[in-house]
């Protein structure tokens, strides 16, 4: 989800890379769960997020959707899935009674990133610290790649870049022709979310096979139009 923000208002004025230290570590978080409530539809899920959930919970895209764990919303002109918030507190469906994440090892990339954000420009991105988002005041410095807690952070960042700019191209396409929002979104959902993943296989290899097949198809479709 893109946001139009004033970096001077929301950040500490710095941009970071994966090896940089940043005051993001809340010391294990004691479960205030502020960041897991009232988030609306903002926790948009990418294909890797669904892969983790499928591998960890044995629930595919349709099962997560039908079970009320995720929902679909329009994000910058495309229909994409997000974690669902429920109840009077609008809490994440995976938040337990103790205010802890019940899928912490499987948590989506946006959750791993918090309280950091990403600033995309020139075909890449850098990180920034959202200084007003987490109420904990004595956060400690930690390397960003350690905070994300992911294997092979370089490959992960390449995936994040490629997925973001794939979506950007599609958003530009549907913006110029709103009638294409539904067909483009359905193809996107079917290819990158609904089509089964091999949970025992390498996610990135599977993703790039799908991406390479998707791009020519989109080019052919636009030529036909």
Image (cartoon, rainbow, N blue to C red):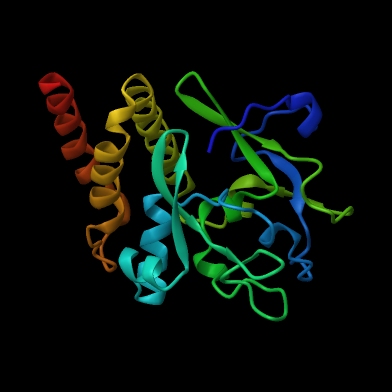
Q: Residue shown at 66%/64% (left/top)?
A: 90
Asked if 44 appears above or below 51 in the picture, the reply is: above
Asked if 105 appears above or below 157 in the picture, the reply is: below
From where the camera sits, is residue 123 visible?
yes
Residue 216, given in percent of the width and then of the height, sits at 15, 30
Residue 208, given in percent of the width and then of the height, sits at 25, 43
| Quadrant of res 119 | top right
Q: Residue shown at 77%/47% (left/top)?
A: 133
Q: Residue shown at 88%/54% (left/top)?
A: 138
Q: Is residue 8 left or right of residue 66?
A: right
Q: Quadrant of the C terminus?
A: top left
The residue lying toward the viewer, choosing from 162 and 84, is 84
Q: Is residue 220 left or right of residue 124?
A: left
| Quadrant of res 38 | bottom right
Residue 179, given in percent of the width and then of the height, sits at 29, 30
Asked if 33 appears above or below 221 in the picture, the reply is: below
Q: Is residue 145 left or right of residue 124?
A: right
Residue most toward the front? 179
Residue 164, given in percent of the width and then of the height, sits at 43, 35
Q: Residue shown at 26%/45% (left/top)?
A: 186
| Quadrant of res 217 | top left
Q: Is residue 147 left or right of residue 122?
A: right
């Amino acid at each position: 989800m893109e946001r139009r923000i004033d970096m001077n208002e929301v950040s500490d004025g710095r941009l970071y890379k994966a090896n940089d230290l940043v005051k993001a570590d809340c010391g294990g978080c004691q479960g205030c769960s502020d960041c897991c409530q009232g988030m609306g539809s903002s926790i948009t899920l990418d294909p890797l997020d669904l892969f983790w959930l499928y591998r960890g919970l044995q629930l595919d895209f349709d099962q997560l959707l039908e079970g009320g764990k995720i929902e679909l919303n329009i994000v910058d002109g495309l229909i994409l899935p997000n974690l669902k918030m429920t109840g009077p507190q609008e809490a994440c469906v995976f938040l337990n009674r103790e205010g802890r994440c019940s899928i912490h090892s499987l948590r989506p990339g946006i959750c791993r990133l918090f309280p950091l954000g990403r600033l995309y420009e020139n075909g890449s991105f850098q990180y920034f610290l959202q200084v007003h988002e987490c109420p904990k005041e004595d956060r400690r410095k930690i390397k960003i790649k350690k905070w994300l807690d992911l294997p092979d952070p370089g490959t992960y960042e390449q995936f994040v870049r490629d997925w973001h700019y794939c979506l950007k191209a599609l958003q530009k396409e549907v913006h110029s022709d709103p009638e294409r929002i539904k067909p483009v979104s359905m193809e996107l959902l079917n290819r990158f979310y609904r089509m089964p993943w091999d949970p025992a296989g390498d996610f990135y290899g599977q993703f790039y096979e799908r991406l390479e097949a998707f791009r020519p198809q989109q080019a052919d479709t636009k030529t036909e139009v």
